[in-house]
Image (spheres, rainbow, N blue to C red):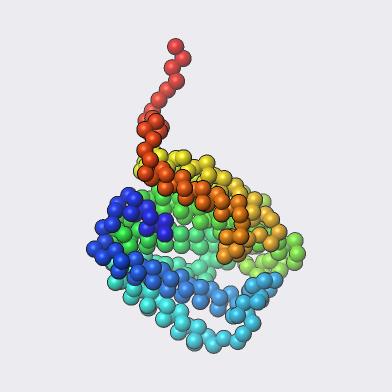
Amino acid sequence: MPGILLALLLRGPIAQDIVLSLVTGFGAVVCIASANYVINEWLDRDFDRLHPTKSTRAAVQRELRGELVFAEWLLFVVVGLALAAVCSTITLWLAAIFALQGLVYNVPPVRSKDRAYIDVVSEAVNNPLRFMIGWSMIDPATIPPSSILLAYWTGGAFLMAAKRLSEYRQLAASHGTELLVRYRASFAGYTEISLTASCFLYALLSSFFMAIFLVKYRIEYIVCFPVLAALFVHYLALSMKPESAAQSPEKLYRETILMGLVALLGVLFVGATFIDIPALETLTSQHYITLR
């Protein structure tokens, strides 16, 4: 959705058939994401068995046939790529990379999710990929600015690191670090301190790239920055709570303060899109304070 929205604001509808592009683009994303989750659930089943809550997942509780799981994955990939091809050539390429990322992240011998820090960066790359697919539904002739893609990538890395921090704190306290490492090999390369420090790094990088984008493309968006910073801080604090919703993103809608900040950010973004603030233009050029 952010990719679609930003493409509409900065580029306008360029695709010849917007409705067809949106339908096929959304269908492609859903199918490829589903394919990635299929192999994730299947290949993680023996590790999820060690997790106090993930052990209730269907792939752990039930005996599944590998050939049917593979057939389901292949079906999702084929349909997803076919829909992407109807959308545009660039959408097809992006969908193919999206599907490949699922293999790199989940399938041995690469299985990047088992390598500390690489796991976060390789999982977070889904963010700019989805952003670009959304952009391509509106404007298949260009790709988004690198500043917003890097901001989206590092912002996703912050969320993934915060999720791991929450898992680390909870499982290490309740079951010890030995089980934690057996559940996910990447935790052998982490400590609570290193995970917290990495969250700060990803948040700083995302803020830096976001500031570049805001100043270059519409200075009025700078009014959104304080709320964006508050979102980073609140989410990090949220990840440190017991049974944190940061471990289960589908439960985040229950976090009242978080949802309030998101709503406020949305209102500010819409306002900054349509309201010009000439006084902010001074921030885009050099100025010095004269002492005499």
Give x and y (percent) for residue 279.
Answer: 39, 31
Q: Residue at x 52, y 66 (%)?
A: 112
Q: Quadrant of the N terminus?
A: bottom left
Residue 268 position (above or below residue 181)? above
Q: Residue furthest top?
A: 292
Q: Quadrant of residue 64?
A: bottom right
In this image, 156 relative to 52: left or right?
A: left
Locate the C terminus by quadrant.
top left
Left or right position of 178 against 28: right
Residue 79, percent from left and from top: 37, 77
Q: How many marks?
A: 0
Residues 147 and 277: in front is 277
Who's the residue at 61% across and 57% down the image?
255
The front one of 209 and 263 is 263
Position of residue 89 in the picture relative to residue 117 (left or right): left
- What residue is shown at x 65% (from left), y 77% (from top)? 56
Nearer to the camera, 241 or 119:
241
Q: Quadrant of residue 289?
A: top left
Above-or-below relation of 243 to 234: below
Say if residue 132 shows up in the picture: no
Q: Residue at x 41, y 53 (%)?
A: 149
Measured as percent of width and height from the top left, residue 172 is found at 72, 62
Q: Position of residue 146 (x, y in %)?
A: 38, 50
The answer to which of 287 and 274 lies nearer the viewer is 274
Choose top left, top right, bottom left or bottom right for residue 63: bottom right
Residue 79 seen from this side? yes
